[in-house]
Amino acid sequence: MPELVLEARHLRKVFGDFLAVDDVSLTIARGEILGLLGPNGAGKTTTIQMLLGLITPTAGEIRIFGLDLETHREQILQRANFSSTYVSLPYTLSVRENLAVFGRLYGIKPLAPRIDAILELLNLRELAERRTKELSSGQLTRLHLAKALLNDPELLFLDEPTASLDPDTADQIRQLLKRLRSERKLSILYTSHNMAEMQEMSDRVVFLSRGRVLATGTPCELIARFEAEDLEELFLKIARGDMEGRR
């Protein structure tokens, strides 16, 4: 039985009269990459926000590292991290200053050597003193990932981790994440609209549609089950409603 790093059971989230997430359950094992997929409005962002403790589920339970998220959020987040290019960093600070701010928040000691190592890991050393507002979108993406890796997390939530990256840099990032998973047993929740990337990276996939889990399995299992050529064709079928009623 694999060790579960994350267990979410029967999550439900209601905003007024709107049911955003309806009975979503998922697990992530140690060293596993779980792809979370679905069309816009499927409930991915709301689910991730609940898993990070940013919003409280209307119903359901979340346990991370065997601990209840509601009562042990600070302890859990010391061992986890999150990266999304849709979250802004302080734009007047330099790359190094941004990492220093978050490093202090994470309680990393000694901090300076860790920042240097992360700058080297993400090929950001030459940009260390540049102000964040001067970075390109691809450079910002790498800075977000550097921030997320700063505390050497055991669980990583990645929202579009290769967005805006050129194909070569995107491939380098994917290989880095695979290496960290292999070397450190890093567990990753991964979202992307690049279906080829999701098929390459994900050990398992959870497809959400209209706030519910439509299907779970390995990419190969789901492609065979729904008679699709690849994840992209399956995604299109789900987005267009062709899979409703099929599990």
Image: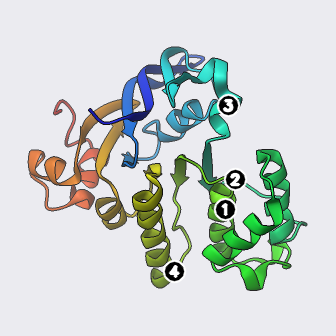
Pick whichever of labels 3 and 2 is earlier in the sequence.
3
Q: Residue furthest top?
A: 59
User: Callout 1, which amino acid?
Assistant: His
- Residue 45, position in %: x, y? 53, 40
User: Callout 3, which amino acid?
Assistant: Gln
What is the number of the mark on residue 169?
4
At 40% from the left edge and 43% from the top edge, which residue is drawn? 30
Pick whichever of labels 1 and 3 is earlier in the sequence.
3
At 69% from the left edge and 59% from the top edge, which residue is drawn? 147
- Label 1, label 4: how many angstroms apart (C-alpha)? 14 Å
- Label 4, label 3: how many angstroms apart (C-alpha)? 33 Å
What is the number of the mark on residue 87?
2
User: Callout 2, which amino acid?
Assistant: Val
- Label 1, label 2: how many angstroms apart (C-alpha)? 9 Å
- Label 2, label 4: how many angstroms apart (C-alpha)? 21 Å
Pick whichever of labels 2 and 4 is earlier in the sequence.
2
For mark 3, what is the residue?
Answer: 75
For mark 1, what is the residue?
Answer: 144
Q: Is residue 38 above or below residue 89?
A: above
Q: Secondary structure at mark 1?
A: helix
Pick whichever of labels 4 and 3 is earlier in the sequence.
3
What is the number of the mark on residue 40?
none
**In this rendering, position of residue 4 left or right of residue 13:** left
- Label 3, label 2: how many angstroms apart (C-alpha)? 22 Å
Pick whichever of labels 1 and 4 is earlier in the sequence.
1
**In this rendering, position of residue 6 left or right of residue 156:** left
